[in-house]
Amino acid sequence: MLEELHAKSGHRILRCDGRLLASREDPVREAARWVSNHRKRFSGRSSVIVLGVGCGYHLELLAKEPTIKKVIGLDYDSSAVEWVATRTENIENLKVSQINTVPEVVKDVVVDSYSVLRYFPSLFVNPAGYERSYRFLLGRSLEGAEFIFSLRKEFSQLQIRNKSEGPISIHDVQLGSGEASSLWRALGELVS
């Protein structure tokens, strides 16, 4: 259950099942620190996918980064998604969505360079589900790898040797025919 509160800074924040989804003091300052701490992970990427929408302040700041073309916030809590979507509806390159729509929402993002980040205050709701989604988006699950390989032409020659349910690693990927250096460069971009 979501409850709306006001932080000491005056910003609107949410509490979900007794846990705050942003700082009670200043959620914008907290979001700025979060973005700064993750800068190396999204530097050089054109899109960022964030698991956990929280109160959306971190998503807004990411969307204002000059090099980022698109930010997608995904969450299991439909109420949080709706609340953040309403609050951020005028931000052109920001989209928030429920996590069960991952393939449709991220189709146009995974064809280019992207980063997947986690916003930990939101992850307590469904830790196992978020971990599955994280592995999917990075191509480290069988379904995720097949999804990404189907959308990126440079991956069309890659095949997965190990079809188990465990995490996919570089050792499970086999090169088909094609130029090996470009395939490995593309795969390296995905998993870095």
Image (tube, rainbow, N blue to C red):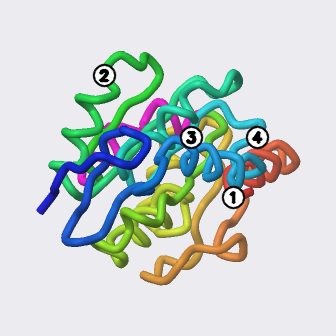
Residue 38 locus on image (x, y percent): 68, 52
Q: Are marks 2 and 3 in contact (CB under 8 Å)?
A: no
Secondary-structure class at tag 4:
loop
Q: Distance between the residues labelled 4 and 1?
A: 14 Å
| x, y percent for residue 23 | 44, 56
Instruction: Indicate which disc residue 48 carries.
Output: 3
Q: Do the residues labelled 3 and 1 touch (CB within 8 Å)?
A: no
Of marks 4 and 1, the one in the foreground: 4
The amino acid at mark 3 is Val
Where is residue 117? Give x, y as percent: 56, 55
Amino acid found under the numbered disc labelled 1: Val
Q: Nearer the viewer, residue 14 or 153?
A: 14
Q: Earlier in the sequence, mark 3 or mark 1?
A: 3
Q: Which amino acid does label 4 sit on?
A: Ser
Percent position (x, y) of residue 58? 50, 43
The label shown at residue 12 is none
Magenta segment: does it hold 105?
yes
Q: For marks 3 and 1, give the CA distance.
A: 14 Å
Q: Residue furthest left?
A: 1
For mark 3, give the secondary structure.
Answer: strand
Residue range of the region highlighted in magenta in the rendering: 100-111
The residue at which mark 1 appears reads as: 191
Report which quarter residue 56 is drawn in: top left
Which quarter shows the C terminus?
bottom right
Circle nearer the viewer, 2 or 4: 2
The residue to which callout 2 is attached is 89
Q: Image height check: is 135 above or below 154? A: below
Q: Mark 4 points at which residue?
A: 43
| Disc 3 to disc 4, C-alpha distance | 10 Å
User: How far apart, in angstroms, are the residues tagged by discs 2 and 3?
Assistant: 18 Å
